[in-house]
Amino acid sequence: MSPEADAEPQTRPLVTIIDPCDKHREHLRRALNGRYSAAAFQSAGDAVRALATIAVPALILLDERTSSSGGTAGLETVWSDPLLRDVPVVGLAKTEATDFVRALRARGCLVLIKPFPRDKLLMTITSSLTQSIEAQWDTIEPVQRSALKKTVAIFNEVPNLILEGKPIPYSDVRDSCACLVEAVRHRNFDALLDSVKGHDNYTYVHSIRVATFLSHFGHELGLRGDDLLTLATGGLLHDIGKVSIPQAVLNKPGRLNEEEVSVMRGHVVLSVDMLDHITDVPRGVATIAAQHHEKVDGTGYPRGLKGGALNDLARMAAIVDVFGALTDRRVYKDPMPPEAALDLMTEMQGHLDQRLVRLFRDMLLDAASALRSV
């Protein structure tokens, strides 16, 4: 049977829907629209046969009714296929008390109990994809593995601790970036960047890339010790306020309207407010968060700072942030090749400090192996 596939940009992760109900398949396809590509099938057997000639999906949504023999038969069909056995599965069920759900739980898979809202569906998919990617970090070198695990932990913990009114010592944040700085010092961070491919938390992926390249930039300019850690933590937390931005705005596939632009720009103030809850946070970390969207000609935001009013660390952060945004993979665009991004940045005369742009370009040309997009 031919799959019901969406003709969407290849930047979007492919989610396979396996559900015998035509109406429910279409409902799920509409729910994924704008965030994921979808290929839908009536049965697990249909999916296995078709996906062998299409592509291995990032995730499978499998309804318990997928087989007349029961949901576990559908799971066995998927898990017995060499191409699909390691693909994360999210089960769709009416109740927890079934062999289908128990089999999924035993494999560490997530389950959605019907009915469920679209937000919960998207959140569960994100959690499953993220869980799958982070499990792969166990296979990379210890320093890189530690850098990823510690930074993602602190990135996720800071907003929750703030909401709970609990103190956040800067030492905890700094220590999370120490392994990142160590990897940068030894120019051993290409696998680290490769290892966040497919991670479904865009804000974290962008932030770890900015932290890595910003640390590398600082190291090449001669910064060491606490100064380098300040750059790393500033890069990691520069967009932390985006955790409070609605997902519909943060991941909108099209152009933002005026109101949405205002909401998005509000992440700067939100980031600074969050950093105020971290005890003993260095001024440089807060400055990077506050000024990374300012421009040298004064047309940036939120304060319209100009020229000499801009901190040198913030000037560096603005360059790395723009480079990251251009070369990041998003649901609505392919990543721009690094060389093309650097060419474009040299035209941003009123936006970026061109002396630093030239230094950044030279640094990246000397570290071409780290330019792989995630």
Image: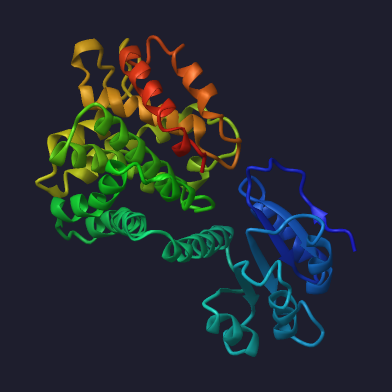
306 or 353: which is nearer to us? 353
146 or 122: which is nearer to us? 146
**Side (left or right) of 308 relative to 187:** left
- Residue at point 61%, 36% (across, down): 334
Residue 269 pos. (x, y %): 27, 35
Residue 87 pos. (x, y %): 63, 66
**Side (left or right) of 337 relative to 207:** right
In the image, residue 48 sits, relative to residue 361, either above or below, namely below
Number of numbered labels in the structure image: 0
Q: Is residue 139 visible?
A: yes
In the image, residue 363 sits, relative to residue 117, either above or below, namely above
- Residue at point 53%, 62% (across, down): 120
In the image, residue 56 sits, relative to residue 19, either above or below, namely above
Q: Is residue 115 visible?
A: no
**Side (left or right) of 282 relative to 181:** left
Residue 139 pos. (x, y %): 45, 64
Q: Residue furthest right?
A: 1
7 or 97: which is nearer to us? 7
Quadrant of residue 110 within the rendered picture: bottom right
- Residue at point 13%, 35% (across, down): 283
Residue 135 pos. (x, y %): 46, 66
Placement of the N terminus among the 4 image quadrants: bottom right
Q: Residue furthest left?
A: 280
